[in-house]
Image: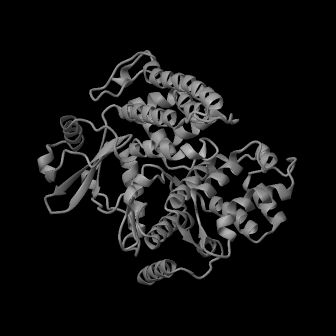
Amino acid sequence: MFGAESDPSSATATDDGIQAGRLRRAAPLASLTARTAGDAVVTGLRGRLAGADSTEFHIRTAERYTELLGRSKGALMKAGQMLSFVSAGPVIPPEYQPIYQAALERLCDQAPPMAPELARDVLERELGHCHEQAFAEFDWEPLAAASVGQVHAARLHDGRAVAVKIQYPGVAEAIAADLKNTELLVAFISLTLGCLSPKKLSVDLRGCAREMGVLIGEELDYGIEAINQTTFAEYYRGHPFIHVPEVVAELSTARVLTQELVLGLPWRDALTAGQELRDQWAEAIWRFTYGTYKRLYLIHADPHPGNYVFHEDGSVSILDYGCVKRFRRGQVELLDAIVRECLRHDVLGTWRACVEAGFWRSCDPVTPEEVFAYWWEDFALLWAQERFVVTPEYVARRIARRCSPTGPSANALRYFDAPPEYAFMSRVEPGILSVVAQLRAGNHWGRISAEHLEGAAPFTEMGKRERSFFAARARASL
């Protein structure tokens, strides 16, 4: 077993093929990285000398490491899922971005599943009895297989349709080994940022690996996820367009999570829906993310498309609460103050709010104007007076501005030092924007945000419905 290994570089395997051992798990990715680097050099030379098209190289490379990540499960696969939905404009040439996104998106819902007999063994061992005692029906063909576990449809004896998430045996140990093996995640990030891009970015690869590791490591205990999900479900129960599945606590453990089964449109179908529906879905996701952050000081920190189920009435069901960040009220207010001062076009106010939040020190050689420009340009969707359509190109420019050491915010970035408690926002924000951008959704985003920042009256129809919902709940609690 993984936990009994005395040599961290020794190589063993669990029953479903999850490889353990640092060297064995790192070797295939390192090999693919080196192979891709060599192919990239050859392809680049052919392109420059003969004008050859490199599309085939990018298709082949995307397929190679999507297959590798899918087989790896654990930390590597989760990392691939994270990258599948973020607009990677500064990283991969624009003409090739769809190739990588299409390949990686398959990791969200088409991961290699474990065998039915293995899933049954895990389920019954966790529940402490045979599955027939708990379920009237159980479909051993998984609905989805992801990085940590797979989901099965079932029916309880009382008739309720449920989804049962079963964690892969040994995956917790495999992930723990991955996260200790910094070189493994560094190799993965290197493959994405280095080998696939003609640009050499100044990126702290080990820092990125540590940050990615924190997010991945929190998703192993389904007991914690059940608590998180129950908190959200209670808050949004009966909401007009946000739905959180109810947890069946008596059939949930640290490795099994049973919850209400949600049926609806998957991500790929949502992308081809009409504009009005896509706008409504995007607004629902936006309000869910930032509304919960503002009211409960909680944020759903894993916004990849596979966690959303879309409905024809404009509502959205939100899944997967393994990674939820909790804030203190003061932390939320400090970040809100920066946005509020910036949107008021108060340069000195923005600077003071940033210093108070700890993003810059007052002695740093950065001007208030540079700090203001860092935020102001990024908030284009909030200060736009008209309906603003969020596109992948807009998100890519935003990420480039935030991350480029040679861009217009280079000096501000040089001294930018966000406190650790805000690190999750740097993942959630581009994730939500990328989801909205792929839906190509438009709205008056500034007016929506003003409800939370300034207490403004709702502007959209969905906002009015939500305000009525919470007002009725408040009256009922008196």
Residue nearer the viewer, 417 or 250 = 417
Residue nearer the viewer, 47 or 175 = 47
Residue at the spot 27% in from the left edge and 57% down from the top edge = 248
Residue 64 percent across, percent down from the top left: 43, 31
Would you say 169 lies left or right of 194 here?
left
Would you say 72 lies left or right of 52 here?
left
Residue at the spot 65% in from the left edge and 28% down from the top edge = 49
Residue 393 percent across, percent down from the top left: 61, 55
Would you say 165 lies left or right of 232 here?
left
Question: Compared to 478, does 162 lie above or below?
Answer: above
Total count of labels: 0
Most extreme residue toward the front is 50
- Residue 334 appears in the rendering: no
Residue at the spot 60% in from the left edge and 27% down from the top edge = 46
Residue 256 percent across, percent down from the top left: 29, 45
Q: Quadrant of the C terminus?
A: bottom left
- Image color mode: one colour
* Residue 130 occupies quadrant: top left
Q: Quadrant of the N terminus?
A: top left
Question: Compared to 241, does 142 lie above or below?
Answer: above
Residue nearer the viewer, 240 or 315 = 315
Residue 50 percent across, percent down from the top left: 61, 30
- Residue 376 appears in the rendering: yes
Question: Compared to 190, does 363 lie above or below?
Answer: below
